[in-house]
Image (tube, rainbow, N blue to C red):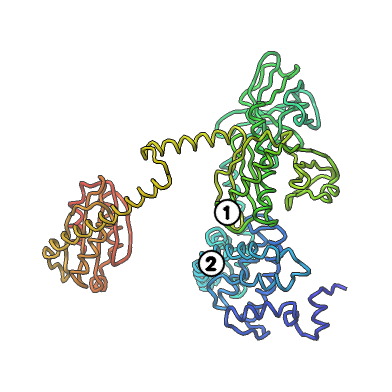
């Protein structure tokens, strides 16, 4: 019948609007409590804002809980657009200027706990992601609204009747306004948006981006015609094969070749794992393959040159040392993924990865920085699995069977009907994966996390090492520790010795600051009497000797205060071989037209070959030409 759940509830509860039912009433009451505004169920903009928030927060929260994070592309951008539309409504029509939507997530989680428990289970994570998105948009929203209001006023005055494509793209590119938000605001002001013009601007930007990385590719030259390349690299790193075809490519003025073999042991970049490198030997001539990628079911081998003879047999040999280090890092990624889920929670899901011979990089959904204790826990779990020397079992089966046995799949990833499943202890890690892996976890040797950072709202990144790379990491850190011990003259307790030195440095810094303050006070006492009257201003301009730009600024402020509201102070100094200038002006001087910031930019900065800025009362500049400092004071004085 087309009657959705909300309409059915409206009929059953005898309401005139979906938003009057208990499906939305709890959320609307929460919005009233947060904003101190009252919902009237009318058609005014305030009531519309209530309904927009109540509706949009459901879509946003459920989608994030289901694994889709806001982003600038694809489905993630749909979520971002919905969220930013909601932010604009509460900012403009509920007069609420701080994050609001994240405060509604707990209301939804409690309401739908029994029918959608995933939201309740990931409450903290979803709330954090929503808040970070709100914070990010609110930082540009005020400036964006000011800009669009200026555009609206201009277009109305000109009678054009629409926001042109270039302006719409500026709002998108500079202020983060999705095109549908710009369209909505334009409609509220009886204007249209030149959307074809917007799309043209977007296309031009994409074209510029493509041009920056453009590759000139020649046609394929067929040697032996084959439809697809067969990959034999799971079981061997060397095979005898033939060249199927090749082509010449040119990028940034450099020529290279792409070669397709009938069969190859070279793994092509995919699933985060980098492509193999190695050699091809044909008729006694050996060339280096520096990368392997996949394109339309073809394994493409990248080389700087091709052999003179291509028709004979080819010995394709993978760089086994590099392949092994890549492989141990890929298996370590699976171990770490499972460990992260055990330590942080089941909301952890892979959002991206890079696996090469030097390290692994893993992006995952999580709402907070990992503590040192959490990192230690993850490392301990992974290293325990390594010591257990667990067999790595690889199976091929139907996708449905794999999911039924608990295999993890990437959200949004497309899989064939038959999938490859990597099992490292059925009770620990089961993942769909097409990469190369070790025979047992003992081959990883040792695992260590090097870095943990944020890469986007609700997404963290871990960089880690294992195998030979982990050994090198430990060696470097042990050497660093030894160097620190030597520098500290071999203390028994290194940490205590460092803390003691830090305390001593802090104490010396305080003493130095005290001495500097006394020195500045003495300089100020000496300079204040030297002030003269210039065009009704208490003017003082001189070059001084100070240790830092901060000291120069503090001295200028102190002298200005001593000279009163009509003071204008210009201090110059050569600090570490560079020119430094500060201008300070009192309230009355500013009221008469003195603008320290303008003087710095238009008079001082060009003289000392530098830059600077500030406010009307206080501004500073830095430059490379100390020889011109003597002219600065007179140049400023002439402008007063």
Q: Residues within 10 Å of mark 2 (few under 14, many from 20)?
A: many
Q: Quadrant of residue 171?
A: bottom right
The residue labelled by disc 2 is 138
Q: Quadrant of the C terminus?
A: bottom left
Quadrant assignment, res 577: top left
Quickly name the residue at label 1.
Answer: 370
Mark 1–mark 2 distance (CA, rounded to whole Å): 26 Å
Asked which secondary structure carries label 1, the reply is loop
- First along the sequence among labels 1 and 2: 2
Residue 480 locus on image (x, y percent): 45, 37
Extreme residue in the top direction? 284
Q: Along the line of sight, which residue is nearer the eye, 299 or 511? A: 511
Q: Position of residue 191 (x, y in %)?
A: 60, 72
Label total for image: 2
User: Residue 445's spot in the image, x, y percent?
Assistant: 64, 35
Q: Based on the displayed image, in which of its 4 quarters is residue 275 positioned?
A: top right
Is residue 640 at all visible to an observer of this figure? Answer: no
| SS class, disc 2 | helix
Q: Residue at x 63, y 56 (%)?
A: 366
Outermost residue, right side: 1
Report the side of 243 relative to 534 (left or right): right
Estimate the x, y position of residue 214 in percent, counting from the top left: 60, 39
Examine the rendered structure and indicate whether residue 356 appears above or below residue 79: above
Q: Is residue 82 above or below residue 226?
A: below
Residue in the foreground of this view, choosing between 540 and 34: 34
Which residue sits at x=56%, y=55%? 369
Is residue 306 visible from the viewing direction of this image? yes
């Amino acid at each position: 019948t087309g009657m959705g759940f909300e309409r059915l509830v409206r009929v059953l509860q005898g309401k005139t609007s979906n938003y009057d039912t208990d499906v939305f009433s709890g959320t609307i009451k929460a919005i009233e409590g947060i904003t101190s505004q009252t919902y009237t169920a009318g058609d005014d903009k305030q009531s519309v804002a209530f309904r927009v928030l109540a509706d949009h927060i459901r879509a946003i929260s459920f989608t994030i809980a289901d694994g889709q994070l806001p982003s600038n592309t694809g489905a993630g951008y749909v979520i971002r657009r919905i969220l930013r539309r909601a932010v604009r409504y509460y900012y403009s029509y509920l007069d609420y200027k701080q994050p609001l939507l994240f405060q509604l997530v707990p209301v939804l989680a409690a309401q739908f706990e029994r029918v959608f428990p995933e939201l309740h289970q990931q409450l903290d994570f979803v709330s954090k992601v929503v808040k970070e998105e709100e914070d990010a948009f609110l930082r540009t929203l005020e400036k964006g609204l000011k800009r669009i209001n200026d555009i609206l006023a201009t277009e109305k005055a000109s009678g054009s009747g629409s926001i042109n494509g270039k302006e719409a793209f500026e709002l998108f590119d500079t202020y983060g306004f999705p095109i549908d938000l710009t369209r909505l605001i334009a409609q509220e002001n009886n204007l249209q948006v030149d959307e074809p013009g917007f799309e043209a601007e977007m296309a031009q930007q994409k074209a510029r981006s493509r041009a920056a990385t453009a590759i000139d590719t020649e046609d394929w030259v067929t040697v032996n015609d084959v439809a697809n390349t067969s990959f034999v690299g799971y079981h061997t790193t060397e095979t005898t094969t033939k060249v199927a075809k090749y082509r010449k490519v040119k990028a940034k003025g450099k020529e290279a070749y792409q070669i397709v073999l009938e069969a190859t042991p070279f793994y092509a970049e995919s699933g985060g794992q980098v492509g193999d490198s190695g050699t091809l030997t044909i008729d006694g001539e050996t060339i280096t393959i520096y990368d392997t990628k996949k394109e339309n079911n073809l394994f493409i081998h990248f080389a700087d040159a091709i052999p003179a003879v291509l028709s004979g047999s080819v010995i394709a040999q993978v760089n086994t040392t590099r392949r092994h280090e890549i492989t141990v890092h890929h298996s370590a990624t699976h171990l770490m993924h499972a460990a992260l889920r055990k330590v942080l929670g089941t909301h952890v899901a892979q959002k991206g990865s890079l696996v090469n011979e030097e390290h692994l990089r893993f992006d995952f959904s999580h709402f907070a920085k990992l503590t040192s204790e959490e990192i230690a826990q993850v490392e301990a779990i992974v290293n325990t699995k390594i010591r257990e020397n667990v067999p790595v079992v690889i199976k091929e089966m139907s996708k449905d069977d794999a999911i039924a046995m608990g295999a993890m799949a990437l959200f949004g990833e497309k899989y064939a009907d038959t999938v490859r499943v990597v099992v490292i202890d059925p009770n620990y890690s089961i993942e769909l994966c097409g990469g190369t892996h070790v025979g047992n976890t003992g081959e990883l040797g040792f695992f260590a996390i090097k870095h943990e950072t944020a890469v986007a709202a609700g997404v963290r990144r871990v960089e880690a090492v294992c195998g030979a790379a982990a050994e090198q990491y430990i060696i470097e850190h042990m050497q660093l520790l030894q160097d620190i011990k030597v520098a500290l003259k071999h203390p028994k307790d290194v940490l205590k010795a460092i803390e003691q030195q830090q305390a001593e440095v802090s104490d010396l810094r305080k003493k130095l600051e005290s001495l500097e303050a006394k020195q500045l006070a003495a300089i100020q006492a000496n300079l204040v009497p030297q002030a003269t009257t210039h065009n009704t201003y208490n003017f003082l301009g001189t070059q001084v000797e100070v240790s830092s730009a901060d000291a120069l600024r503090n001295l200028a402020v102190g002298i200005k205060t001593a000279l009163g509201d009509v003071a204008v102070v210009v201090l110059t100094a050569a600090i570490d071989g560079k020119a430094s200038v500060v201008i300070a002006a009192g309230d009355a001087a500013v009221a008469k037209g003195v603008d320290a910031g303008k003087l710095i930019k238009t008079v001082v900065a060009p003289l000392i070959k530098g830059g600077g800025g500030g406010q009307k009362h206080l501004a500073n500049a830095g430059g490379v030409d100390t020889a011109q400092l003597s002219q600065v004071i007179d140049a400023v004085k002439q402008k007063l």
